[in-house]
Image (cartoon, rainbow, N blue to C red):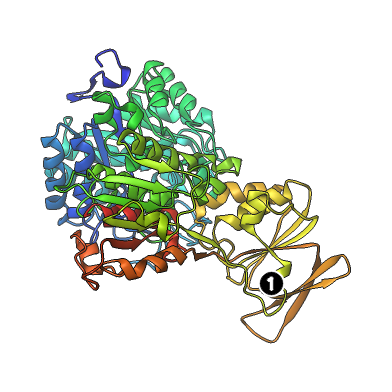
């Protein structure tokens, strides 16, 4: 381990970091009343305990009242934050982990109708497309006030015992001053690069004067906006040199790109199907030119890439942020020789997409992340060994088997198909979503390691299950596409699954009716359009693909727009009729009184799934609980103890889409919180 580049200590001024792995600043949206309370602290402490050298808290912690969070960020302008940050910092320090926080003023990257309804402020009046607010142009008193707010916030963090802070300058107020695209100021803060940087250096000078030389200060900034008329790579290099030469900054944290649109944000923080570590070489060029401490994170999701980043001298500290959401114990697993057991980040971006829709960050296949107070990151063995039968080897069934085996039970899994995976296997047929198979592969490997018995190509009926003399039966049989939704013509349509599986060949002129708003319709559209077919996607919602969140939608839209796919919103599919060699699809509207027709040769329907629940109902009569779940016990993490049938010989549960159509995270979460108490 001593020869591993990732485990070489790093000296950052007076601070010794134990290794080269860090969690970059990010906001998982766990604060309560703007404060990093118990849930927030538990999340960071879990990763500190596992050995990460530096955890950066609070992406975009707000320094001013007129920088209201657009999702649930820490309010660094409140004195109350000191006590909560001190608790978090002290506990992380107990595990040898350094702690910093990112401070910012959002500028135009917010809305005027949030929090106190103060006007957004920027270096000009140009609105940000993503958040839509037209800002006021900062006056001299705004600049002086906000400089003071930054300094006060930094002092609060020093009082809380943090090792340092990071100022954000990509897409936020600082680089809104930097960029010619957003700075329309007159006088001292506009025009030349010197003037556009003046606000930043006034903030840095104020922080140094108040917090001293021993408090670490860095800047996370864009070294190239990659926008016509914006900051160029040459500008970024010059800014990097000036930050270094100022003597006010201790490290640089480099990104490349812009975040004012969903597409721009996705290029800065790439998602599934996009290139890994796309900006690593660029960050390495900054480090080579400046010879200054350089940090970076952007889809560095595997240890091999992180190791290369350090070994090649491109970075001094490498961020694996979403990877640590998938597996908080990366460092511990490497150190004990279990690198191959790291739960992989599959790039689904369920974590970040959720926060931009007002939820808290959750990992698509680690339901304990963000729930460290309630759910175990490592399942502990139980006291009694039981015979557990799981039916179905999709994500829900595999997680149930994994957790049951970790509890020490004797586990058998029946699967009708030849391989595990369920719906994920279909999802992964789309090249851009092939990483999803790692959800299956990791669980399959963990189950194999713990001795789970798999019986593939086996359609398990009640007799098959009972032959195992089970004590616990978990039905994870999933669901099947539901397309019977029309007033007439159900027999003339195919499902999105039929297209993805190859059971139905694409037509030449195709209407896709997406009444679920999730991935299958998009994937079917892409597969059909790739053949050269004409494709129209119709939905009754006001927006397309309502369940596919903004960043994950970006690569899909890029592909579909390139193939000239048409999207039509606010219309529903009412009926389909045969006409000659083609079909006539009749569209209606929830708004009433209108209809339209489309002449096509294929209609594809995406309307979610209905549970495959026949086995569950066949088994209910012989179960001691008759399938009933004690929801209070489930939520509180207690064993299920309901007895409705004293003569029953086993407990019976169903999980995932065998209950109702939901998503991968819900299926896996069902399994973890149920089976951890079995």
Question: At 31% across and 67% down in the image, what residue appears?
Answer: 622
State whether residue 27 is above or below residue 194.
Answer: below
**Residue 80's spot in the image, x, y percent?**
15, 57
Number of numbered discs on residues:
1
Q: At x 23% / y 50%, what residue is drawn? A: 386
Would residue 272 appear left or right of 217 to someone viewing this image? right
Please name whichever residue, 274 or 456, is drawn nearer the observer in this view of the structure: 456
Task: Find residue 342 and report its image quarter.
Answer: top left
Query: For this rendering, which residue is in front, 231 or 125?
Result: 231
Q: Quadrant of the N terminus?
A: top left
Residue 36 visible (yes or no): no
Q: Which residue is mark 1?
A: 490
Percent of width and height locating residue 180: 53, 43
Residue at 54% in and 38% down: 274
Q: Quadrant of residue 228?
A: top right
Q: Nearer the viewer, residue 662 or 630?
A: 630
Q: Position of residue 166 (x, y in %)?
A: 29, 39
Query: Which of 332 and 214 lies nearest the eye of the viewer?
Result: 332
Give the residue at the far right of this rendering.
580
Can you name the residue that lies furthest to the top here?
A: 3
Question: Residue 515's image quarter?
Answer: bottom right
Badge 1: residue crowd in 10 Å (few <14, some 14–19, many ≥20): some
- Report if residue 442 is visible in the image: yes
In the shown orientation, is residue 660 left or right of residue 52?
right
Residue 511: x and y in percent read 73, 63
Q: Secondary structure at mark 1?
A: helix
The residue shown at (16%, 39%) is 92
| Picture quarter with the C terminus | bottom left
């Amino acid at each position: 381990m001593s020869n591993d580049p990732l485990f070489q200590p790093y000296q950052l001024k007076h601070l010794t970091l134990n290794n080269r792995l860090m969690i970059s600043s990010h906001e998982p949206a766990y604060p309560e009343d703007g404060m990093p309370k118990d849930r927030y602290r538990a999340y960071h402490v879990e990763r500190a305990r596992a050995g990460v050298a530096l955890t950066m808290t609070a992406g975009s912690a707000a320094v001013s009242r007129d920088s209201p969070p657009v999702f649930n960020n820490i309010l660094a302008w409140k004195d109350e934050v000191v006590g909560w940050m001190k608790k978090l910092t002290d506990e992380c320090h107990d595990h040898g982990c350094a702690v910093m926080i990112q401070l910012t003023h959002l500028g135009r990257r917010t809305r005027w109708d949030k929090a106190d309804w103060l006007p957004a402020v920027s270096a000009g009046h140009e609105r940000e497309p993503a958040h839509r607010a037209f800002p006021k142009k900062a006056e001299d008193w705004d600049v002086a006030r906000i400089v003071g707010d930054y300094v006060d916030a930094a002092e609060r963090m020093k009082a809380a015992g943090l090792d340092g802070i990071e100022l954000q300058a990509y897409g936020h107020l600082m680089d809104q001053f930097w960029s010619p695209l957003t700075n329309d100021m007159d006088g001292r803060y506009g025009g030349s690069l010197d003037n556009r940087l003046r606000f930043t250096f006034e903030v840095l000078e104020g922080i140094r004067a108040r917090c001293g030389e021993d408090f670490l200060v860095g800047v996370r900034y864009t070294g190239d906006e990659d926008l016509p008329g914006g900051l160029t790579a040459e500008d970024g290099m010059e800014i990097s040199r000036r930050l270094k030469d100022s003597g006010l900054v201790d490290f640089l944290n480099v990104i490349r790109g812009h975040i004012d649109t969903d597409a721009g944000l996705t290029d800065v923080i790439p998602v599934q199907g996009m290139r890994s570590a796309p900006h690593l070489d660029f960050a390495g060029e900054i480090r080579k030119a400046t010879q200054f401490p350089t940090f970076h994170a952007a889809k560095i999701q595997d240890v091999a890439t992180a190791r290369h980043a350090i070994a090649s001298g491109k970075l001094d500290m490498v961020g694996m942020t979403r990877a640590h959401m998938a597996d908080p114990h990366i460092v511990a697993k490497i150190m004990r020789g279990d690198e191959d057991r790291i739960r992989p980040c599959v790039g689904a971006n369920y974590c970040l997409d959720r926060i931009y829709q007002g939820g808290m960050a959750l990992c698509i296949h680690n339901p304990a992340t963000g729930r460290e107070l309630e759910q175990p990151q490592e399942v502990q063995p139980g006291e009694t060994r039981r015979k557990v039968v799981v039916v179905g080897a999709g994500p829900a069934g595999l997680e149930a088997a994994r957790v049951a085996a970790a509890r020490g039970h004797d586990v058998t899994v029946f699967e009708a198909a030849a391989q595990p995976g369920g719906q994920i296997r279909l999802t992964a047929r789309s090249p851009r979503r092939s990483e999803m198979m790692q959800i299956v592969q990791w669980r399959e490997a963990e189950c194999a390691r713990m001795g789970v018995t798999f019986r593939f190509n086996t359609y398990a009926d009640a007799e098959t299950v009972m032959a195992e003399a089970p004590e616990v039966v978990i039905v994870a049989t999933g669901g099947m596409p539901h397309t019977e939704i029309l007033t007439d013509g159900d027999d003339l349509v195919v499902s999105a699954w039929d297209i993805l599986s190859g059971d139905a060949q694409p037509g030449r002129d195709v209407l896709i009716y997406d009444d679920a708003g999730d991935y299958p319709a998009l994937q079917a559209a892409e597969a059909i359009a790739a053949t050269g077919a004409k494709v129209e996607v119709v939905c009754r919602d006001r927006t397309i693909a309502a369940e596919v969140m903004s960043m994950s939608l970006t690569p899909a839209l890029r592909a579909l727009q390139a193939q000239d796919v048409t999207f039509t919103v606010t219309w529903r599919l009412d009926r389909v009729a045969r006409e000659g060699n083609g079909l006539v699809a009749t569209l209606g509207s929830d708004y009433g009184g209108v209809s339209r027709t489309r002449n096509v040769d294929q209609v594809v329907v995406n309307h979610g799934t209905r549970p495959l629940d026949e086995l569950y109902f066949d088994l209910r009569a012989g179960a001691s609980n008759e399938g009933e779940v004690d929801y209070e016990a489930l939520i509180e993490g207690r064993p299920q103890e309901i007895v409705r049938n004293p003569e029953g010989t086993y407990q019976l549960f169903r999980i995932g889409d065998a209950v109702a159509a939901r998503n991968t995270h819900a299926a896996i979460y069902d399994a973890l919180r149920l089976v951890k108490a079995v």
